[in-house]
Amino acid sequence: MKRCYFCKGEIISKKIDHVHSWKGKIVLFNETPAEVCKQCGEVYLKPEVVKAFDKVTSHLEKIKQTICIPVVPFTQLAKV
């Protein structure tokens, strides 16, 4: 793909951090190969990358490196 489907901007290959939600869990994949629009930032992932995500997320219990992140319901923002 040479041009963005949405804005027709130039597409470049780069490594990104991709946040993936699966069965109520969030997984961060760093250094994910992607095609990214230089103009609007739209991300395009190749089918083999998405298949790799599926393979990993089906075995989440084997992942050793984890982090803890705060979860703030939007309704609580008005109280801050």
Image: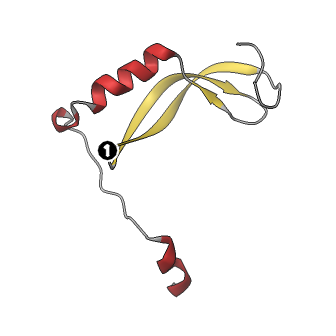
Measured as percent of width and height from the top left, residue 16 is found at 53, 31
Q: Is residue 77 left or right of residue 30?
A: right
Q: Is residue 51 left or right of residue 74?
A: left
Measured as percent of width and height from the top left, residue 65 is found at 24, 39
Q: Could you tell me which residue is drawn at 82 percent across and 31 percent down?
A: 7
Q: Crowding near pointer 1: few (<14 within 10 Å), some, many (20+)? A: few
Front position in the image: 49 or 16: 49
- Total number of numbered labels? 1
Q: Residue furthest front?
A: 23
Q: Residue furthest left?
A: 62
Q: Identify residue for label 1.
A: 23
Residue 37: quarter of image: top right
- Looking at numbered disc 1 in the image, what kind of residue is underneath it? Lys
Measured as percent of width and height from the top left, residue 48 is found at 44, 14
**Image quadrant where one finds the N terminus:** top right
Q: Residue furthest right?
A: 8
Q: Could you tell me which residue is drawn at 44 percent across and 23 percent down?
A: 50
Report the colour scheme.
Answer: secondary structure
Residue 60: quarter of image: top left
Measured as percent of width and height from the top left, residue 58 is found at 25, 30
| 25 is higher (above) or lower (below) than 2 | below
| 44 is higher (above) or lower (below) than 21 | above
| 27 is higher (above) or lower (below) than 56 | below
- Please tell me whether mark 1 sits on a helix, a strand or a loop: loop
Q: Could you tell me which residue is drawn at 36 percent across and 20 percent down?
A: 52
Front position in the image: 22 or 67: 22
Q: Is residue 15 left or right of residue 50?
A: right
Q: Is residue 69 left or right of residue 49?
A: left
Q: Could you tell me which residue is drawn at 77 percent across and 31 percent down?
A: 6
